[in-house]
Amino acid sequence: MSNYDVSVIRPEVKEEDIKFRGEGYSKKRLKSIHEALITFHNLETMATNVYKYQMTNEKSELNRLLLAAMLNESTHIQDFEVKLYEYGFRPSLLRYAYRMLAFLLGFITRMLGPKAILSLGVWVETKAVAHYAELLESIEWDEETRRMIEKDQADEDLHISRWSARLNEI
C-alpha cells in the first residue's frame, strides 16, 4: 500500500469526482458492493468513535495522535457514505449500534490506560486491514472506488504501525 501518501489525512475531493455508479451492473455485483460498503461504513463509524472516546483532556502526544486518527477515520466514513449514495444505497441503521459499541470500547480502554488504548487500536486496525483485503479481493469494484478503498486501507496500515511502535515504547 506504499503507493498512497498516508501523511495526507483528508484527501481532496472535487465536485466532478462525485458521480452515480453501478449502471449496467448485475444484481449480484450490486449486492456484493452494497454489503461491502455497509461493512466498511459501519466499521469506520466504530473506529472513529473508539478514538473519540479514548481521548482525554490532557494535551499529550497520544491524544494528538488519537485526534489525527479520529479525523482520518472520519474521512473514511465520508468516503464510504458517498459511495453508498453514488450507488443508490443508504447507510445501515446498525451504524448506531457500532457507535454504542465504540463508546464502550473507547471509554473502557481510556479508563484502563495507554497500554489498553494502544492494544485495542492495533487489534481493531488489524481486523480492518484484513476486512479491506478480503473485500478488495472478492468484489469487482470500479477503479475510482478501488483506489479510494486502497488508500483507506493504507491509512489503517499506518495506524497499526503507529500504535504498535507506541505500544513497544511502554
Image: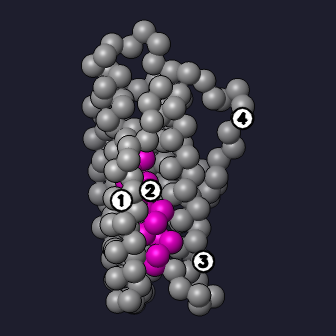
The residue labelled by disc 1 is 98
Q: Which mark is first along the chain, 4 or 1?
A: 4
Between marks 1 and 3 in the image, the one whose residue lies nearer the viewer = 1
Q: Position of residue 6 (x, y in %)?
A: 57, 55
- What SS does tag 3 mark? helix
Q: What residue is rendered at 28% in x and 41% in y?
A: 134
Residue stretch rendered in magenta on the structure: 40-54
Quarter of the figure with the C terminus: bottom left
Counting other residues with Cα less than 10 Å from the Cα at mark 3, is it few (<14), some (14-19), or many (20 or more)? few
Q: Quadrant of residue 58?
A: bottom right
The residue labelled by disc 4 is 14
In the rendered image of this protein, does residue 84 appear above or below residue 78?
Answer: above
Counting other residues with Cα less than 10 Å from the Cα at mark 1, is it few (<14), some (14-19), or many (20 or more)? many
Q: What residue is rendered at 51% in x and 21% in y?
A: 21
In the rendered image of this protein, does residue 17 appear above or below residue 121?
Answer: above
Q: Which mark is first along the chain, 4 or 2?
A: 4
Marks 3 and 4 close (CB-CB < 8 Å):
no
Q: Which mark is residue 45?
A: 2
